[in-house]
Every structure is written in C-alpha cells, then in structure tokens.
Amino acid sequence: MVRRDDRTMDLLAWAPPQVAAGYEPRVAGRGSMANQIARLVGQALRDATDECGVTRSQVAAAMSLDLERSISEDMLNKWASEAATGHRIPTDAFVSLVKVLKAKDLLGFIPAQLDYVAVPKKYADIIEMHLIEEKERDLVARKHALAARLRSGS
C-alpha cells in the first residue's frame, strides 16, 4: 500500500497568483458591450451575496452613501439585467460598485477592451524596472553595433 505524504507541499499544484484584475472571459461572454457590462455587474453582485452574504439592498445603501445620491436596489437590478436596455450603469456608479464590493475583477473589463490590463499599484515599480532594463539592453545592443561599425571603418 502506498502512503501519501500529506505534510509535504506539492510543488506542481502551485499556481501563481492572479496579477491582472479581471473575470474569466466567459463571465462577460459575447455580444454587445452593454450586455457584457450587465453580466459583469450581475456576477459581482452574485459574488458579494455568495461570498459575503451582502444583499443588493445593502449594496445600494452603501453606494448611496459613497455617491451622495440615492441608489436603489431596483437600479442595481436593472444595471445587472441585459433586458433593461434603457438602464446602463453610469461610470461613477461603476467605480462606486467596485469600491463598495471590493470587486477588483470588475476593473479588468475596460482596460481589456483597449488591450491593456489593470494591475495592483504594488506592481508598478516592478513593471517600470522591467521596462528600464529592456531599454538598457536595447541601448547596449545599439552601442555594440555602432562600436563594431566604427571598428570596421564603414
């Protein structure tokens, strides 16, 4: 009988943490941007209910405080409905929804439409360092090419 060591971590089971914010593409799905946004809003509201037990009325109340205007549960329902074509979430309400729900995955949608990603601020210096190192490599290669051309006299 083979015994499995359950005290040793399986290195192959490790997966890197998600760096860029965003839901899996299947959440937004296909179709118009308005429908995709409605699906994402609906998913974020479902996640808040499933993971934290937060109701839509509680979300609406928190958003009302954040935006200093009335947000109703009915408005949330319409923003999350693909069928409510006349009711789309305004940008300030979208930002408030992200803040209230701490739904960072909502942030990934807009940048993805423009071939960008949203990453946490803590990674900004790492990205900048990489870009600087990349530029340094390009400059060194250019410098070597110029030096070789000068040596050859052409």
Image: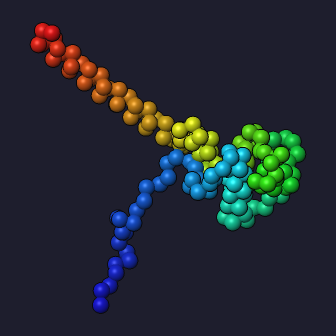
Residue that protrudes farthest toward the top in the picture: 153
Residue that protrudes farthest toward the left in the picture: 152
| Colouring chosen for the image of the structure | rainbow
Q: Position of residue 38 (x, y in %)?
A: 72, 51
Say if 23 sits above or below 88 in the image: below
Q: Nearer the viewer, residue 13 or 110?
A: 110
Q: Position of residue 131 (x, y in %)?
A: 40, 31
Camera sees residue 53: yes
For residue 66, side relative to residue 102 (left or right): right
Q: How many marks?
A: 0
Say if 115 sits above or below 2 in the image: above
Q: Position of residue 79 (x, y in %)?
A: 78, 50
- Residue drawn at x 66%, y 64% as measured from the top left: 51
- On-image quarter of the N terminus: bottom left
- Residue drawn at x 25%, y 24% as measured from the top left: 141
Image quadrant assignment for residue 130: top left
Camera sees residue 58: no
Image quadrant assignment for residue 132: top left
- Residue drawn at x 34%, y 31% as measured from the top left: 133
- Residue drawn at x 59%, y 40% as measured from the top left: 113
For residue 57, side relative to residue 35 (left or right): right
Residue that protrudes farthest toward the bottom in the picture: 1
- On-image quarter of the C terminus: top left
